[in-house]
Image (cartoon, rainbow, N blue to C red):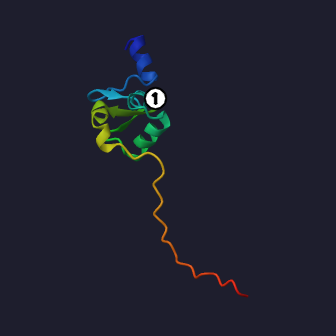
Amino acid sequence: MGLMELWQVLYGCGVKPKGKVMTTGQFAKAVGAPWSTVVHWAQTGVIPGVTREETLRGPVWAIPESALDTFEEWRPKIGRPRKAKAQTVKRRPKDDAK
């Protein structure tokens, strides 16, 4: 094993992905979302085909490029859901005479 191969294994570059994959940072930049949001999507399994690869340096999320092609189909809704309309309650008219 040469010095370069050893370096790649020690620092996490030795992961042999199946097909073309992206990191969470690359995916975040491509879709225009914050990195932390993409990590949350990966952790919760929202991104189709995402895998967590263990390396000596720590876990790395491998996102297939096909997820980028189908992003508009599975993209989560952003923001807080709207509140349901409150039912209006008819109040009795106030009695002015006391």
Q: Is residue 74 left or right of residue 86?
A: left
In the image shown, does 4 or 74 lie closer to the viewer?
Answer: 74
Q: Residue furthest bottom?
A: 98
Residue at x-position 46% and y-position 29%: 56
- The residue nearer to you, when weighing 92 against 50, is 92
**Amino acid type indicated by mark 1:** Leu
Label 1: how many residues lie within 10 Å, few (<14), some (14-19) or many (20+)?
few
The quadrant where residue 31 appears: top left
Residue 85 at x, y = what percent? Answer: 46, 64
Q: Is residue 49 visible?
A: no
Residue 70 falls in which quadrant of the image?
top left
- List the single residue furthest toward the front: 97
Give residue 69's quadrant in the image. Answer: top left
Find residue 33 and report its horizontal and vertical position in percent: 44, 34
Looking at the picture, how far across and down is residue 98, in whole percent?
Answer: 73, 88
Quarter of the rendering occupied by the N terminus:
top left
Q: Position of residue 41 (x, y in %)?
A: 41, 42
Q: Which residue is disc 1 drawn over? A: 56
- Compared to residue 13, the image places residue 97 above or below, namely below
